Amino acid sequence: MATVLGARGWECGETMLNTVDHQGASVSAVAPKTGGYCLRLFAFPSAHARWAIDGTPANPSVSVWVDASDSYDVENGIRIQFLLGTGEYIEILWNEVTHTLDAYVDGGLVEAGTIEISVNDWFHVQFSLVIDDAGSIQVKIDGHLSIDYSGDTQPGAATGATYVYVNGLNQIEFFIDDLVWGTAGYLGDLRCLDIRPTADTGQDDWTPSAGDNYSTIDETPPSDADYNETNTDAQADELDMGDFDGVTYDPRATVAWVRAKMLAATGDSIKVGVDSAATDSVTEHALSTDEEYYFHTNDDNPADSGAWEDADIDALKLRYESVIA
């Protein structure tokens, strides 16, 4: 079964991208696939966004909804790429004549897509890669197999992917939504839902600028005008979260996130994650002196190492903890 390593849905109303990770990316509320926001890419001469892939896997995979918009009849209008550790790209590239996504290895076409995107509207892409001299590229469009390539997908020394990129050339505009990346095959049609803090718990060490701890971080889009702060090591907040829509959706993975910074470059860190049934699962991140986003993904429920269930999500708590140098 495929494993989820990360996801973005932009329901917070921000790109959630640091400056070095994009050019020409912004959020749009015009016509998202899911919820109230999607990611818009538009810049001259090109626009791009990228997301780091933990562990440099040899079998990366991505699922994303795409609206070609102005790029529908534009050469190289859309690229979905895996960047390898030695700088080469394995990508699917928009063909403005056939309206297909075609597979390329280090700039060379290896297989044309067979599924035409005949309507300029949202369509779903699943792109699964095995990096090897005898590797494979498989792509599904709206659930139908479009590319099934077997051959050399390791053009250099690197056997793993470091980033997934979405970009376009020639001053075009297009949109993406519900981006999920992982490993080991097709991820499926996954949607990224936003669940916000709703209440404090007994674990509320940080000091709010005003009001309750949860109320300083529950707004959309995020505001830096109110916040929680601490200058003491090992202080943690755990916040109750809203309910999951288990009628419409089945839970697949969780991604906890915070927006944070340190006031001076002293080497502080923050642990970000969840408390699931009294089991903590966190990732520690070195902090910047600029406001940045920090994430933690759980493919399975850390409380029992099993699949997530509706009740698990409803009881989940957001957790963050200070690490003061």
Image: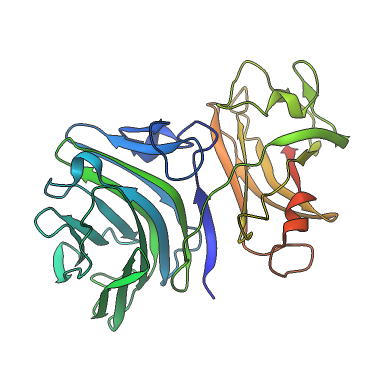
Q: Residue furthest right?
A: 202
Q: Residue furthest left?
A: 97
Specify the quadrant of the image occupied by residue 49: top left
Specify the quadrant of the image occupied by residue 232: top right
Specify the quadrant of the image occupied by residue 111: bottom left
Which residue sits at x=38%, y=63%? 161
Looking at the rendered structure, the number of numbered marks drawn on it comes to 0
Q: What percent of the width, then of the height, locates residue 229?
A: 73, 24
- Tell me if 229 is positioned left or right of 66 in this view: right
- State how the image is colored: rainbow
**Residue 164 visible somewhere in the drawing:** yes
Using the image, determine if residue 71 lies above or below residue 199: below
* Quadrant the C terminus occupies: top right
Q: What percent of the width, then of the height, locates residue 106?
A: 19, 64
Using the image, determine if residue 278 lies above or below residue 135: above
- Tell me if 26 is positioned left or right of 234 in this view: left
Q: What percent of the width, then of the height, locates residue 96?
A: 12, 53
Which residue sits at x=77%, y=21%? 208
Which residue sits at x=80%, y=28%? 206
> Camera-side residue: 121 or 93?
121
Using the image, determine if residue 325 lies above or below residue 129: above
- Tell me if 12 is positioned left or right of 60 in this view: right
Which residue sits at x=54%, y=76%? 1
> Camera-side residue: 183 or 38?
38
Q: What percent of the width, then of the height, locates residue 99?
A: 16, 57
- Tell me if 70 is positioned left or right of 33 in this view: left
> Camera-side residue: 285 or 39?
39
**Residue 324 visible somewhere in the drawing:** no
